Amino acid sequence: MNRKYHLGVLYLILSAFFFALMAVFIRLAGDIPSVEKAFFRNIVAFFIAGSMLVRSGEKIHIPERAWFPIIMRAAFGSIGIFCNFYAVDHLLLSDASILNKMSPFFAVVGSYFILKEKFTFSQGLAVFIAFLGGMFVVKPSFSSMDFVPAAIGLLGGVGAGLAYSFLRKAGSLGVNSSFVVLFFSAFSCILCVPFMVINFVTPSLYQFVMLLLCGVSAAGGQFTITAAYYHAPAKEISVFDYTQLIFSTAFGYFIFSQTPDHYSIIGYLIITSMAVWMFFYNKKHSE
């Protein structure tokens, strides 16, 4: 194991903590529309990334062929954020977290098409079993009030997974990570504006503080996850992203008195088991 690998693992666990904390502040912000929450989440990251670029004094050069993965990272990342925020507002924190954590499986699939990384039958089987585990959390029944937000949460995991694949592609082309965060944040904010014009809710002082803390936590998560996937391939470190489930379950229990049902717990175990299995499988074949 080299230094870059260990740094990648550390950054990914830090990002899991920050994103779990972000979900807490999303929930505490109350009855603000999800798109408006996403705007505040991204505008804070935009200013932090911008200030970092200005302070570094680094001249940014973007290769022409890098623009496509940068834009695709922003587009799929925005889909992931909007869907995840909606799920956090309507599901248990742990349920929303595990559905979003389907992203590493879709990152593996995306890496095959985007990065031309090898994709084996065993990896495909793990993705399929993990998807079945996701169904225990989604509990697909149109009679359930939780079905729609759960399905949207799963879609968010798909978007995030594809976004991470494009993120690694941009990194392989030498794109500055702060610029990727800056562009992504600006892109998402612009997408939010039309919806906010139609349905803007003025937050109270308390809600405004929660939204700002959400943005700060998200920025911390964004920078650390970007650093993680810049240091190591998704297929080698993605399992550590599942520490977010531990953080989210703890926050949900102690702050919101949330307890997942037995179907969700079965889903957690299936998805996490597949993540661990895939990690050791990839590690063995890499060696």
Image (spheres, grey):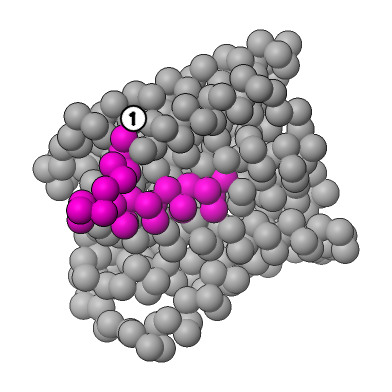
Tell which of 88 and 25 is nearer to you.
88
State the residue at coordinates (88%, 63%): 64
Give how far across and how far down residue 260 sits, in percent: 20, 36
Q: Nearer the viewer, residue 150 or 47?
A: 150
Q: Where is residue 116 in the image (x, y as percent from the top left)?
A: 79, 37
Task: Name the amino acid type tagged 1.
Answer: Tyr
The answer to whether residue 153 is magenta is yes
Q: What stretch is highlighted in magenta?
A: 136-161
Residue shown at the point (61%, 51%) measured from the top left? 163
The reply, left or right, for residue 254 in relation to residue 147 is left
Residue 14 in view in this figure: no
In the rendered image, the vertical position of residue 152 relative to residue 245, given as above or below = below
Q: Name the residue under label 1.
A: 268
| Residue 214 spot, x, y in % from top left | 36, 59
Left or right of 172: which side holds 45? left
Query: Which quadrant: the C terminus?
Result: top right
On screen, 153 above or below 78? above
Q: Is residue 91 left or right of residue 191?
A: left
Identity of the residue furthest to the front in this view: 142
Indicate yes or no whether the magenta region holds residue 230. Answer: no
Q: Position of residue 72 (x, y in %)?
A: 68, 60
Q: Quadrant of residue 66?
A: bottom right
Q: In the image, is residue 30 above or below residue 122?
A: below
User: Along the horizontal axis of the image, is 53 left or right of 139?
Assistant: right
Find numbered disc 1 in the image and state the secondary structure of the residue it sits on. helix
